[in-house]
Amino acid sequence: MDNRITDIRRTIRALRVSMREAEAIMHEQINRDEDCSFVAQEVIKMRLVMSGLVKDRTALGDNEPILVNSFFIPRRRPTRKPLAAAPTVESVFRPRLVARV
């Protein structure tokens, strides 16, 4: 029975990572205005499988949380727009030469 719980926990952990990756791909497709229906359907299927695994795990008496090492999925950095040169103290308060009469 303990091996079955361990197998279910391992499967859930792997499925959670796969779901996060698929959701990241889906969000990138949405940002590019592409069709993401295929990936969305796969995420829904993964959630259905996850629901069944959680029910099995709970029925076996395992209620401890399952931790995943990293939920962070690196994304591309947003493009930075070049900022206009900010005025410095020297450029604002520079001494002015004035002709004396």
Image (tube, helix red, strand yellow):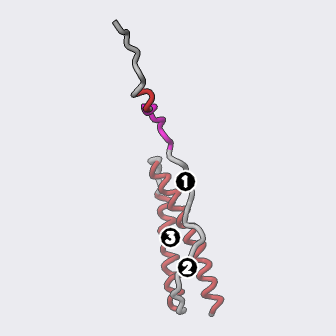
**Span highlighted in magenta in the image:** 79-87
- Kind of residue at disc 3: Lys
Q: Is residue 46 above or below residue 94?
A: below
Q: Are marks 3 and 2 in contact (CB under 8 Å)?
A: no
State yes or no: discs 3 and 1 in contact (Cβ < 8 Å): no
Quarter of the view holding residue 69: bottom right
The kind of residue on which mark 2 rests is Ile
Image disc number at residue 45: 3
* Residue at image coords 48%, 64%: 41
Camera-near label (3 vs 2) is: 2
Magenta highlight on residue 94: no
Characterize the magenta stretch by its predominant secondary structure: loop
Q: Quadrant of the C terminus?
A: top left
Residue at the far front: name it: 101
The residue that disc 1 covers is 75
> What crowding class fits label 3: few (fewer than 14 Cα within 10 Å), some (14-19), or many (20 or more)?
few
Q: Residues within 10 Å of mark 2 (few under 14, many from 20)?
A: few
Q: Residue at x 53, y 92 (%)?
A: 61
Where is residue 45 drawn, in percent x and y? 50, 70
In the picture, the quarter occupied by the N terminus is bottom right
Secondary structure at badge 1 equals loop
Mark 1: give few (<14), some (14-19) or many (20+) Cα within 10 Å: few
Q: CA distance from mark 3 to mark 1?
A: 24 Å
Residue projecting furthest to the top: 101
Residue wearing tag 2 = 66
All told, the count of numbered labels is 3
Decide which of tag 3 and tag 2 comes sooner along the chain. Answer: 3
What residue is drawn where x is 50% and y is 59%?
A: 38
- 85 or 24, nearer to the observer: 85
